[in-house]
Amino acid sequence: IAGITQAPTSQILAAGRRMTLRCTQDMRHNAMYWYRQDLGLGLRLIHYSNTAGTTGKGEVPDGYSVSRANTDDFPLTLASAVPSQTSVYFCASSRGQASTDTQYFGPGTRLTVL
Amino acid sequence: GQNIDQPTEMTATEGAIVQINCTYQTSGFNGLFWYQQHAGEAPTFLSYNVLDGLEEKGRFSSFLSRSKGYSYLLLKELQMKDSASYLCAVMDSNYQLIWGAGTKLIIKP
């Protein structure tokens, strides 16, 4: 059982460049999420998808876009990276969006924007 | 606004008991979660409370008081491998998780 995979593990990116963070799950979960984690702050939701073909904005969506073409994949794109997007990015999934549906996290992508 | 408060850091001794507190103010409540996160790793699920009271799971227990907006995670018989950050999160009325900044627990021999 692989669970959730993310790629790349880490990346250093020049400001202004476009970058796509990949996320794939093999649990057939309906809901998927992208969070960023910064020192001293809680995880903050960027975008989410309750089911394939639908997406929604979280707490900090500006500068990011997502797509959900199928159940398994949920890529996150930074159209034009800025230094404030330096962070650790976690993808997560859950069976549904009910309160009893535990979120499972991928290993994360450490992104540095210079 | 929505707010989750937990201590930044705690220190405890191997074999002892530690209680990590979490207070919250959120728009709606659909459950409270505790996650464990080792340095450089992903958060992993520990517990879920939606009703008042204590939920016990091995060495770990979690308590909830909805009227007080308060929860705690109790870790017994501490082991060195319990050194990690413990994240408190509340599911709000939109079924989104609001996260605290986490409590870094340091275990000393």
Image: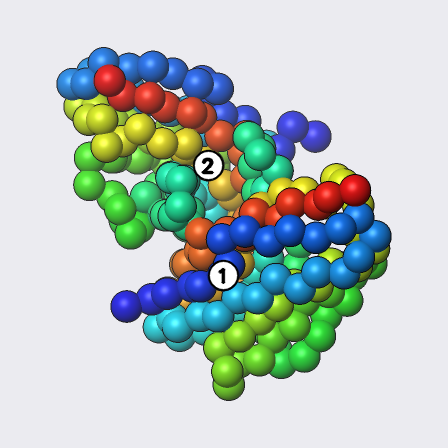
Q: Is residue A102 left or right of residue B74?
A: left
The chain carrying label 2 is A
Q: Which mark is residue B27?
A: none
- Vertical order, A11 against B53 (above or below): above
Q: Residue at x 67, y 79 (%)?
A: B53
- CA separation, marks 1 and 2? 24 Å
Quarter of the image for the N terminus of chain A: give it.
top right
- Residue A56 in percent (x, y) is at 30, 49
The secondary element bearing badge 2 is classed as: strand
Amino acid under disc 1 = Gln
Along the viewing direction, whichever of A32 and B70 lies nearer the viewer = B70
Q: Are marks 1 and 2 in contact (CB under 8 Å)?
A: no
Q: Quadrant of residue B42?
A: top right
Q: Nearer the viewer, mark 1 or mark 2?
A: 1
Along the viewing direction, whichever of A20 and A44 lies nearer the viewer = A44
Quarter of the image for the C terminus of chain A: give it.
top left
- Residue B17 in percent (x, y) is at 76, 60
Location of mark 2 (residue): A91
Location of mark 1 (residue): B6
The chain carrying label 1 is B
Q: Residue at x 16, y 18 (%)?
A: A16
